[in-house]
Image (cartoon, grey):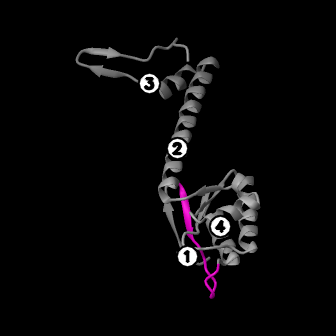
Amino acid sequence: MSELKNYREVGIFDLLSAPLNPIGAFDAEQFKNDAESLLKRKSTFIAVDLTGLDFLYSDAYNAFTQLQKELSLKKCSIGILTNNKTIIDGLHRVGLDRSVLIFRAEADMMGYSIKEEEKEEKAKQKDAVKDSADQLKTGDVEEAEEDTDTTAHSGNADISTVKDATI
């Protein structure tokens, strides 16, 4: 597999530069190949930068639809970076505005990334607390204590985790 060089990371997204054909139009076939390369690398958030393009042909919308369907099966997301009203209207006409993430600026992508990372961290914390509670309920106290030990030392005081606390 050749090295993919036309993307960069923006927050949680792998942002592809819009591939262009010799006449300067969006190259849907090259986009599909580039997106497939990112999927093979286990990318979960793929976006394409359409900044600077004035319009898209129907093959581009079809490529976005196809990629969106593939990504949704894998619990992944596609984003489109554009501030062009014609392209946004086209995405709306084909119904992609309901299934893809549309960003008008990279700062919007970063804001979304921060929110997603916060949600993921909260979910991990919730799962860890639930796992500890399950271990306590099933009698696996030693393992639960290892997971939740929060012993703190302040001078001569020793404050330890309360074993019978409700979660």
What residue is shown at x 55% (from left), y 27% (from top)?
Answer: 129
The residue singled out by tag 3 in the image is 149
Mark closer to the chain start, 1 or 2:
1
Q: Which residues are magenta?
A: 12-25
Mark closer to the chain start, 1 or 3:
1
Mark closer to the chain start, 3 or 4:
4
Residue 125 within the magenta-colored segment of the rendering: no
The residue singled out by tag 2 in the image is 115
What residue is shown at x 73% (from left), y 68% (from top)?
Answer: 61
The numbered disc on residue 3 is 1
Which element carries disc 2, helix, strand or loop?
A: helix
Q: In front: mark 1 or mark 2?
A: 2
The residue singled out by tag 4 in the image is 86
Measure the C-alpha gap from mark 4 to mark 1: 33 Å
Mark closer to the chain start, 3 or 2:
2
Where does residue 10 sit, x and y in percent of width and height? 49, 59
Mark closer to the chain start, 4 or 1:
1
Measure the C-alpha gap from mark 1 to mark 3: 45 Å
Q: Are marks 3 and 2 in contact (CB under 8 Å)?
A: no
Which element carries disc 3, helix, strand or loop?
A: loop
What residue is shown at x 63% (from left), y 87% (from top)?
Answer: 23
